[in-house]
Image (tube, rainbow, N blue to C red):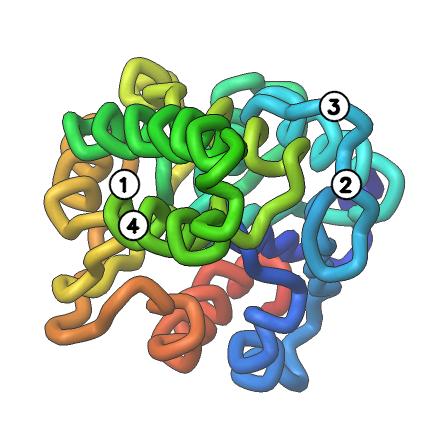
Amino acid sequence: MNATAKPTLVCLHGWGGSAESFTELRKALEGVAMNILTPNLPGFGGEPEPAEPWTVDDYADWTEQYIRERAEGPLFLLGHSHGGRIGIKLATRNSLPIEHLILCAAAGIRRPRHARRIIGLTLAKSGKILLSFPGCRHLQPLGRKMLYKLVRIHDYEKASPTMRQTLIEVTKEDLRPLLKRIAVPTDIYWGTADRMTPYKDAKMMCYEIPHSELHAFEGTRHAVHRDRAEEIAERIRDLLTPWTE
């Protein structure tokens, strides 16, 4: 990367999202002297799916290669939800010159609810097999919907077989042991009303990551990167001051 080039902000979207989810942030950063990259991660936004189920490390490998091929200047890395998982992985590898990490409602803390989710995914698979028996096939559409609703796995319902297994792989990994190894300054943005990644995860990340600061927004839910794009953009402008003065 060219140290004299304009800073680059790489934004990684969440599971089921796409580059479009950063529309508000891009607008809020209009006129700022930086390059903004918002890739569609494999399996989303028209980007082809992986040939086989991926782990968080596989997504991190892909993202690292993407950044090396396109980014210039000081690197700022932002991840929302699943993109936050990838950001945590990359920040602990020390293989990219990351100046600052920005985590928005980042996934990666495994709690008992995640274990229940994985059990639910297994039940969904088993239920599909049971419903395939003669005499039960006419119940398949209704049965699948009931199973998916019961265990709250709508992402799983919509996914292909490869992406379903990928969802299991990325969900089951607990990234908490990595947090203390993040050496770069980190801003954490979270909505207190987030029901996907609970606010207590934000407080845990702030406690574990050495040089971190938590920005909490009362009443905001999981789409903090969209709903609070102006506030996040204002902070990014401040971070760019050493390169824009």
- Residue furthest to the front in view is 135
Q: Tell me, yes or no, if residue 103 can be seen here.
A: no
Question: What residue is shown with label 2?
Answer: 49
Q: Are marks 3 and 1 in contact (CB under 8 Å)?
A: no
Which quarter of the rendering shows the C terminus?
bottom right
Asked if the residue at tag 3 contacts the one at tag 4, i.e. Cβ–Cβ closer than 8 Å, the answer is no
Q: Which residue is mark 3?
A: 52
Count neighbours of disc 1 (C-alpha within 10 A) and say few if under 14, some if 14 to 19, many if 20 or more.
many
Q: Nearer the viewer, residue 223 or 152?
A: 152
- What residue is pinned by disc 1? 212
**Residue 45 percent across, percent down from the top left:** 72, 60
- Horizontally, residue 36 falls left or right of residue 235, namely right
Which dot, 4 or 1, sits closer to the camera?
Answer: 4
Q: Position of residue 32 (x, y in %)?
A: 64, 77
| Dot 2 alpha-carbon crowd within 10 angstroms: few under 14, some 14 to 19, many 20 or more | some
SS state under label 1 = strand
The residue pinned by badge 4 equals 152
Tell me the distance, in whole angstroms, between the alpha carbons under discs 4 and 1.
32 Å
**x 53%, y 81%: residue:** 24
CA separation, marks 2 and 3? 8 Å
Image coords of residue 99 (percent x, y): 54, 41
As rendered, which of 137 and 13 lies closer to the eye?
Answer: 137
Contact (CB < 8 A) between labels 2 and 4?
A: no
Q: Residues within 10 Å of mark 3 (few under 14, many from 20)?
A: few
Q: Is residue 147 left or right of residue 5?
A: left
75 and 78: which one is in front?
A: 78
- Dot 4 and dot 1 residues touching (CB under 8 Å): no
Residue type beneath disc 3: Glu
